[in-house]
Image: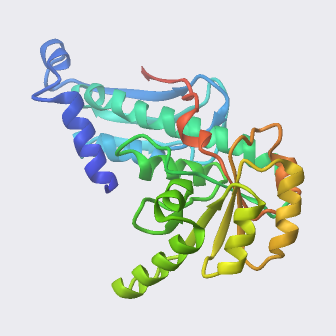
Amino acid sequence: MKIDEIIEKALSEDIGDGDHTSLSTIPKEAKGKAMLLIKEDGILAGMKIAEKVFKKVDDSIIFNALLKDGAKVKNGDVAFIVEGSSISILSAERLALNFMQRMSGIATATKKIVDKLQNLNTKVIDTRKTTPNMRILEKEAVVIGGGKNHRMGLYDMIMIKDNHVDFAGGIAKAIQSTKKYLKKKNINLKIEIEVRNFDELNEVLKTGYVDRIMLDNFTVVEMKKAIEIIDKRYETEASGGITIDTIRKYAETGVDYISVGALTHQIKSIDMSMKAI
């Protein structure tokens, strides 16, 4: 879903047939000015989205950005000032805040984890554990926080997980079937496969035809051994049970990527508010 479509649907959900509170209490010709006040330390994200929201409600609104996405912010900072129709500002403020608070929360959580991996080559990546219809924005927030994006959806990468393997009748069958499917459809997609133990890892290495191996729920010791066995023949990814306290130890094994679903589904939004000035 494109950003403009997300905003249009969100405005339709919120405003419906009109912001009747503002329309009934504020004179139509009234002009106003408001600022976005940061009330919590973090990483700012969603400035461009907020501007699009205000402009979609009323393209005559003046949006003055004082900070940029990715900026470190603290309690008391002002991110932007908007000026124009008071009714338009009131109609747009909540939606702009909703986007920015969640995106900033994701960027902040991502930055905290990325900072744990300073001076290491391992990349922190997100997953598909996102809010429906908000994926493009939440993944953008991960990038703003210093992380990288995994696949966007089911359509842009083959990812053979445990259930696919089980339903297909084994690793070799799943990989061979995937290879035939891609050839038949004339589709060029990277192939990643999840392994749960060393037996499955050895079977993948024997079969080949993949681009990345996900090592799921391996301990740090097991991860180190697995990385040594793979020996850079394929990209590697660690997943499952990894926390901010253990992520550096996993990264020190030499794994290429660590996927963290919590970046987008277990975050706390950053506190912000709009204040008239």
Let me know if residue 200 appears in the view. Answer: yes
> Residue 270 location, x and y as percent?
57, 28
Residue found at x 66% / y 44%: 110
Could you tell whether 107 is left or right of 9 in the image?
right
Residue found at x 47% / y 44%: 47
Q: Is residue 268 above or below residue 125?
A: above
Residue found at x 59% / y 68%: 171
Q: Is residue 268 above or below residue 129?
A: above
Could you tell whether 247 is left or right of 35 in the image?
right
Q: Quadrant of residue 93?
A: top left
Residue found at x 63% / y 76%: 211
> Residue 220 location, x and y as percent?
86, 49
In this view, the residue farthest toward the top is: 25
In the picture, the quarter occupied by the C terminus is top left
Q: Is residue 229 above or below residue 39?
A: below
> Residue 246 location, x and y as percent?
83, 41
**How many numbered discs, if any?**
0
Q: Quadrant of residue 170?
A: bottom right
> Residue 215 location, x and y as percent?
71, 58
Residue closer to the observer: 28 or 123: 123
Could you tell whether 5 is left or right of 187 in the image?
left
Q: Is residue 102 above or below residue 120?
A: above
